[in-house]
Amino acid sequence: MKAWDRIRNPSKLTRVRWLIVYCTDVILIFPLVGYYGFYLNWQQGTPPLAVLAGVAVLLAFNVLSTRPFRVAVQGGRRPTAVLAVSGVLALVLLTVFAQIWAIPTWVALLAPFVRKRVTLVVALASIAVANLFVWWIGGWIISLLMLVQAVLTAICLAVVWANLALWRLTTEAHEGEEALARLAVSEERLRFARDLNDLLGQSLTDVAQRTERAERALATDREAAAAEMFEVRDLARRSLREVRAVVQNYRAIDLDEVLASVRAVLEAADVRCTVRADTGELPPETRTLLATVVREGVTNVLKHSRAERCTITIEDGVLEMSNDGVSGPAGEHAPNGLAGLAQRIRAAGGTLEAEPTADGRYRLRAAVPA
């Protein structure tokens, strides 16, 4: 079922890989011209069994020729057996059935797995072998054949090398986006850790020192020890208020920045995101709550759905997020992760709802007094 979901809703990177592979297949089917050649041979009186044998060899070569480039794109090991068998079939097609179309394709199949200099040497050698064979059987069109095979070989190699370069650039760009996202999260965590360290370091040191003084005074002067402990209590309460203030400031995130960030994250995850938000008149408390809802909603979209489209609208303090990632009964999409957030919104006088809709979408709605 998961495999079918990946086929039905492929990622953006998978779609690009499919496009590159299929475009390369269009070039690698040059040997299909050979079927027409076998048809002409049959029309000219070649025995049907010989024609069928040639068609079978060509068909086997066509099937094998679709494999190596897919392995190269997926980063797999060189398919030595496939390359060897397809090379033998290409030689059989040339020497037995006088079909030159398979040779340029086989050279292109080899190109992703060897150096370019080796590929060029093999290409020149294949052109020479093919033309020497035609000359040996008495062909007078050797110059024309050399030109045709050289052009076909050049086209096949150019397409394979260009598509491989395009795939490498695509994967590097995708990995760069993921690295930037991880870096942003790490930097935010480090900033928050530094703030807490600066805040709590001195406070906890003072608490430890006053506690030691109270412990030493406990045996000789209970009143002094009690006074020290009162100081420790007040210091702990003050530190708690400061920590809560830091956390509140940390949570006071900018709504517009969050909207821009989650849109980029969704687009990077192959989810088309449309944002229509009127946030100019919202007070800071409302903006913070809605920003938190947006982040939680996007997390649910990425973790618990196979959405392709997501819409985010904000108007008069009402946030609505909907996506098309619902694929099962309503009970499978219960918003458990939103329970704590719903309590915060209710405490502020608002409401939060999350449920599948009749049109097969999932909607998250948060209304906060503006």
Image: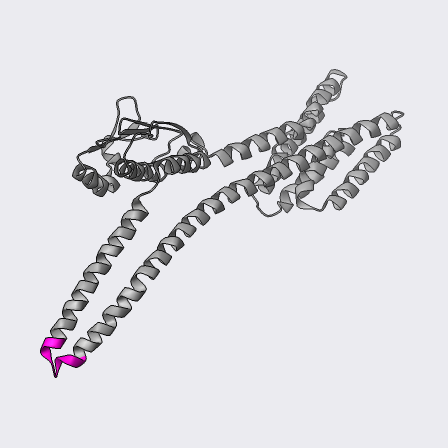
Q: Position of residue 286 (x, y in %)?
A: 26, 36
Q: Is residue 220 magenta?
A: yes
x 61%, y 33%: residue: 63
Q: Quick check: can you spot residue 1?
A: no
x 19%, y 33%: residue: 350
x 13%, y 76%: residue: 224
Q: Quick check: can you spot residue 271?
A: yes
Q: Nearer the viewer, residue 88 or 165?
A: 165
Q: Is residue 189 magenta?
A: no
Q: Position of residue 75 (x, y in %)?
A: 57, 45
Magenta part of the chain: 216-224
Name the main secondary structure of what is drawn in magenta.
Answer: helix
For residue 304, which quarter of the picture?
A: top left
For residue 26, which quarter of the picture?
A: top right
262 left or right of 318 in image: right
Q: Position of residue 180 (x, y in %)?
A: 48, 45
Q: Position of residue 134 (x, y in %)?
A: 85, 30
For residue 32, which quarter of the picture?
A: top right
In the rendered view, would you say 285 is above or below 195? Answer: above
Q: Nearer the viewer, residue 67 or 24?
A: 24
Which part of the image, by quadrant, shows the C terminus?
top left
